Amino acid sequence: MANTRSLSNATAERDQTMLRRVRHLGSGRNGLQEWRLQRWTALALIPLGLYFAASMLRLATSDQMSAAAWLASPVPALLTILFLLALLSHAVVGLRSILIDYVHTRAWLVAADLAVRGAAVLLAGASVLAVLKLFLGR
């Protein structure tokens, strides 16, 4: 009986050690939330991507003024902004997943995560600003 009790204590201590190693390393905390965000953005990118690709094919033979006039209307501007935001958030979640799998040092993981998020915020801001500038005609 004493041997069984010490065995269960050893198992509990081992489980606590493993739990400490897993905590705060990314998907151990937010795995389901990130998985859902990845799936929702993928679903949003299907119609938005098809619309964007069809629009770019249609605009490929037009000049710059007609492309700017197309983007100055509300529906294409809104759909383009939604496409860009969905694309960048999908990319951020995917890159974070890759970083969590392949970067094993905590400091490098935090630095790479900050770089990915910072680049995404800068790209999103510049993209939305460019679309709004064309939409507002300034």
Image (cartoon, grey):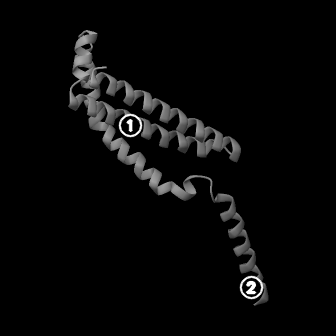
Q: Which quadrant would residue 44 be assigned to in this image?
A: top left
Q: Which quadrant would residue 116 be assigned to in this image?
A: top right
| Element marked by disc 1 | helix
Read off the residue under disc 1. Answer: 85
Q: Nearer the viewer, residue 56 or 16?
A: 56
Q: Is residue 31 above or below residue 60?
A: below
Amino acid type, callout 1:
Leu
Q: How many marks?
A: 2
**In the visual, does 111 lie left or right of 37?**
right
Q: Residue at x 30, y 22 (%)?
A: 134
Read off the residue under disc 2. Answer: 5
Q: Nearer the viewer, residue 84 or 77?
A: 77
Amino acid type, callout 2:
Arg
Q: Which quadrant would residue 68 be assigned to in this image?
A: top left
Instruction: For the C terminus, give its image quadrant.
Output: top left
Question: Residue 14, how many percent across, how many down?
Answer: 72, 69
Instruction: For the N terminus, give its image quadrant.
Output: bottom right
Residues at badges 2 and 1 in contact (C-beta under 8 Å)? Answer: no
Question: Residue 119, how many percent across, how many down?
Answer: 53, 32
Q: Nearer the viewer, residue 103 or 7?
A: 103
